[in-house]
Image (cartoon, rainbow, N blue to C red):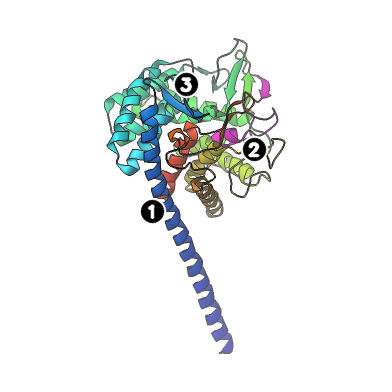
Amino acid sequence: MKYQLQVVLLISSIGICLSCSSQQRATAVKDLNSTIDKNFKDADTQYKLMMQVLPAGQFPKTFERDTLRTSGPGWWCSGFYPGSLLYICEQTKDTVLYNEAKRTLRLLAKEQFNTTTHDLGFMMYCSFGNALRLDSDEAYKQILINSARSLATRFNPTVGCIRSWDSKPSDFLVIIDNMMNLELLFWATKATGDSSFYKIAVTHANTTMKNHFRPDYSSYHVLNYDPATGAVQQKRTAQGAADSSAWARGQSWGLYGYTVMYRETHDKKYLDQANHIAHFILNNHHLPADKIPYWDYDVPGIPDALRDASAAAIMASAFIELSGYANAKSAKEYMAAATTILQTLSGESYKAVTGTNGGFILQHSVGNMPQHSEVDVPLTYADYYFLEAMKRYKEATKK
Ligand code: GLY
């Protein structure tokens, strides 16, 4: 009898404990969702500020020394501005931002025929892909199909990859970032029924999986293939601290890219790859407790090195999606990491005070440290993936 009473007491105290922690979890989720709603409202104010100072025909890049730096539509980041506007107005229903997105889409449209860059996924899918998702306009569809065709011209079947950067004819340069451009190709196969886009994406991902990763699942930034034989000629960096280091944004691009690969193919080897990359990141002893990585996981000078908010935002978005495919233990770990990132980026260290920062939402990203370019500044893609991660968090946690 006494034993039974003890068991009953034990079970009910476990019950209270469990319900207490699930209640605490529910409160934490509710709090972060409220923060996110406020972040979208602040983002709306910020982007209205930015649109007022944006010169005609230009796209924002960053804000440095009190000046908005911009580019034409051919720069790899041009799609993030309309994409961010669309993510914001989807939440705030602000037609001013929606019209601004449509204005800049018209400027960007001609890039559908640009065959000089591999960045068409970033430029066209982050922009027109979101526009099509919100408004099923046939014109957007045709632009995306043409963009996929332009991207596919850069595929070399001997190498098994899409060429990233143009260079001398004996080089064939592929960067890990290129994994992000494959989503456009998967979309194109679904839209047209032409499986060649799908096959190019899968071949590129397989070649990259074979050659770009180290035994610990960190990745090199740049591989140089022999275009005539497909042999690897060089494994090096461009934006990282060293050829052998783990450039932070590159690890985030890989994580995001293989998560998309699993979503689009349901092939478990891509899920395994995404999980391996996730574990490299989360178990890295240089990843700070707030989960905003230094700009390179191996940069000398940690803990005094600069952080990269863009790498954090990209990985938060990827972790939320990957948590939907992973086993329960990993899913919990990924959502916890994404939650920490979103909380940190929403805090005063990273989120700019409304009315400052040239209208960008986040501060403290690193574009290209070796070139001393865009160092410790706001960046369009940090904002874009932060907005996407917040949207994904809202959707993943809604009842
Ligand atoms: N794709 C260029 C970058 O991540 O900086």
Q: Amino acid at mark 3?
A: Trp
User: Tag 3: Cα neighbours inside 10 Å, few (<14), some, or many (≥20)?
Assistant: some
Disc assigned to residue 75: 3
* Residue at 56% over, 54% down: 329
Q: Is residue 21 magenta?
A: no
State the CA–CA distance, disc 3 to disc 1.
36 Å
Q: How many marks?
A: 3
State the CA–CA distance, disc 2 to disc 3.
30 Å
Disc assigned to residue 398: 1
Q: Position of residue 141 (x, y in %)?
A: 32, 26
Q: Amino acid at mark 1?
A: Lys
Which range of residues does the magenta coloring cover? 232-253
Q: Comparing marks 3 and 1, which lies closer to the viewer? A: 3
Report whether residue 187 is seen. Answer: no
Disc nearer the start of the sequence (2/1)? 2
* Residue at 69% over, 28% down: 242
State the CA–CA distance, disc 2 to disc 1.
33 Å
In terms of depth relative to the viewer, which is nearer, 340 or 197?
340
Q: Comparing marks 2 and 3, which lies closer to the viewer? A: 3
Q: As drawn, which residue projects farthest toward the bottom?
A: 1
Disc nearer the start of the sequence (3/1)? 3
